[in-house]
Image: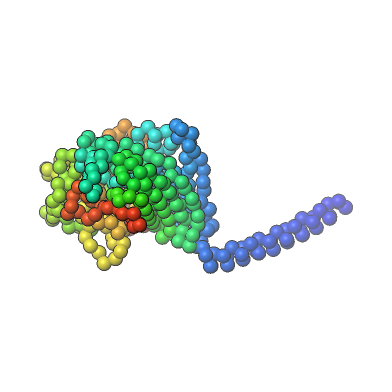
Amino acid sequence: MSIAKPSIMYAVLLLVFSIMGCKQNKKESQSEMETVTTESEQNPIEETAFGEMPDGTKVKKFTLKNNVGMEVDVITYGGIITRWTAPDKQGEFEDIVLGFENLDQYLDGNPYFGALIGRYGNRIAGGQFSLDGETYKLATNDGDNHLHGGEKGFDKVVWQGEAKNTSKGAVLELTYTSKDGEEGYPGKLDVKVTYTLTDNNELDIQYEAVTDKSTVVNLTQHSYFNLSGQLSEPVLDHKIYLNADTYLPVDQGLIPTGEFREVVGTPFDFTESKSIGEEIDAQNEQLGLGGGYDHCWVLNETEKDLGLAASAHHPETGRFLEVYTNEPGIQFYSGNFLDGTLPSKTGGTYVKRSGFCLETQHYPDSPNQPDFPSVRLNPAETYSSRTIFKLSTK
Ligand code: BGC
């Protein structure tokens, strides 16, 4: 007993000091929060290993969290979003993006699930273009055409990742330097992509690039969404809205013909939201060529810099995705090439149309189409593009 007493007093003293210490810490972090950070500071960005490339390069995974429970996993290989959780109308969080469990599966053949796309989102006809009288020959990885940056586009390289908490939320900055001549493109291109997860359930993606020679650039993000959380189920019941009165019809190689065609009276009219399945199997030459929707819509001009381009709603779960961008186009791809051969994260396989993409971008094949907005980037200029994916329920 005589030994116990002092140790009890010691324990009480320790408790008092530690409570005082906690209070002190809390005060410091509160005042810090007031000045420079949001609540997101409470959610440290986790960094974990996600395997190794065949040459030994280590791949990291960063988990961005916000203060209302959303989590986004991004790996440094391809800047790929491998997991993205969002609440349904009952508040239940589920993963809403197609992807794989491990790096080997991504290396084995990834149909661009979740990936950053560059240097050029979508196709360039014949895998070539001219700039200032010089013809540049690119990798042809889609029949005769160049798709999504070539054999080893930005989706297949390892980026440098740096995570930080900021006043806007959890931030991951990814950087990559593409060498002069990589995949056939002129100029050394320094690229930075910043993912910011805010407490409003927005993933804000900012793209920047600078070059040392005139070149072309068109970056995008290739997440396949399935808002039902049942990732192996078709997305035909999702309702899509596209803020576009015209779209770009394509030829057999899915290259825009150059025509701007009105959507009114066609299955391509999403100016009033309608389900993906409603007209996808209609007799229509363009749907036949795409095997479904695989086209670029010409976004209507909005008054805002970041206008509402598109939305997607899954009525059963209530999950609602809005897409804001400063890009002139959006590729709506209904996952037509998925064929049930790849394993789904939620069991089963990724069947045809089990995910859809809303890829904000300049129009496909712009380097060869003088009537399309320019994708040229000159030295001393900065390429800059921004897209926000915002999730809510309704
Ligand atoms: C293209 C599709 C292509 C897919 C690859 C989309 O952006 O529009 O034609 O098959 O990417 O996953």
Q: Nearer the viewer, residue 181 or 350?
A: 181
Asked which quadrant contains residue 202, the reply is bottom left
Which percent across, then down, holds residue 235?
28, 45
Relative side of 13 to 199, left or right: right
Which percent across, then down, holds residue 239?
25, 52
Which percent across, then down, holds residue 168?
45, 61
Q: Which residue appears farthest toward the right when viewing the image?
A: 2
For the C terminus, give its image quadrant.
bottom left
Question: What residue appears at the point 61 percent right and 64 percent down from the top-left corner?
Answer: 28
Q: Which residue appears farthest toward the front when viewing the image?
A: 133
Is residue 39 among the parts visible in the rendering? Answer: yes
Relative side of 74 to 111, left or right: right
Asked which quadrant contains residue 208, the reply is bottom left
Question: What residue appears at the point 21 percent right and 47 percent down from the top-left corner?
Answer: 133
Which percent across, then down, holds residue 238?
27, 49
Question: What residue appears at the point 17 percent right and 57 percent down from the top-left corner?
Answer: 245
Question: What residue appears at the point 64 percent right and 62 percent down from the top-left corner?
Answer: 25
Q: Nearer the viewer, residue 91 or 209?
A: 209
Relative side of 184 to 248, left or right: right
